[in-house]
Each structure stands twice: as C-alpha cells, then as structure tokens.
Image: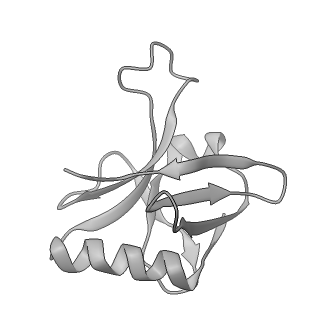
Amino acid sequence: MNIHVTDAAKQALQQAFDANPGKKAQLRYDAEGCGCAVSGVPTIWLAEELTGQCEQLETNGIPLYIQSSQKVFFDDQMTIDYNEKAKTLALKSPAEMLSPRMSILVK
C-alpha cells in the first residue's frame, strides 16, 4: 500500500505533529458509532501508542501506520490531499474519493 501525501497535506499533518509531540499517525477505518463495521470513516489518529498489529505504510515522507486487518478497506494506491476550503484532509484513490473530509483525531 502506497500513499502519496501532497505538499499541502504534509503541511497540515506537520502542524498536527508539532502540536502533539511524540504521537504517531495511524490511518484508521473508524467504525465506532457507525452501526456497522463496513460503514466506517477513514480517519487519521494521532496517538502515543499504535492500536492493533500495525505496519508502516509507504509514503513520500510522512510516517504513517495502519492496522494490518484494516488494509482491506483501502486501495493500494492513495493520495492524501488538503482541502483548503473545508480546512481538512481528503483521501482519494485513482478509482474514487474515499473521504473528502478526513479528520485528524488526537487520542
């Protein structure tokens, strides 16, 4: 799995890292409160400890992890971009927009 992070998204993520030193970024398919495990929302969690059995994703500079069991919810090639108008991240693949407003959740 490879994720390209645009320069604008790198800047937004770096600001989150700077505000939360020592925390690691984990791409999550967050289904809490969604009613069904397959009705989740892509989210980036910033936490001191990674949850579950994780592996580091291939990115262009931003350290990002994912639970091995959650890889099924994502595409092999994705891009994290920054939506200036909404002031949030966007997760997309060549085939679809996975999340036009992906949040960063500090745990």
The image shows residue 36 at horizontal and vertical percentages of 50, 15
- Residue 30 placement, left or right of 81: left
Depicted 26 relative to depicted 21: above or below: above
- Residue 105 placement, left or right of 61: left
Count of marks, rendered view: 0
The answer to which image quadrant residue 47 occupies is: bottom left
Image point 58% across, 75% down: which residue? 58
Image point 16% across, 70% down: which residue? 20
The image shows residue 51 at horizontal and vertical percentages of 30, 48
Depicted 19 relative to depicted 43: above or below: below
Which quadrant of the rendered structure holds the N terminus? Answer: bottom right
Q: Residue furthest toward the top?
A: 35
Image point 38% across, 73% down: which residue? 13
The image shows residue 65 at horizontal and vertical percentages of 43, 63
Image point 27% across, 71% down: which residue? 16
The image shows residue 85 at horizontal and vertical percentages of 52, 62
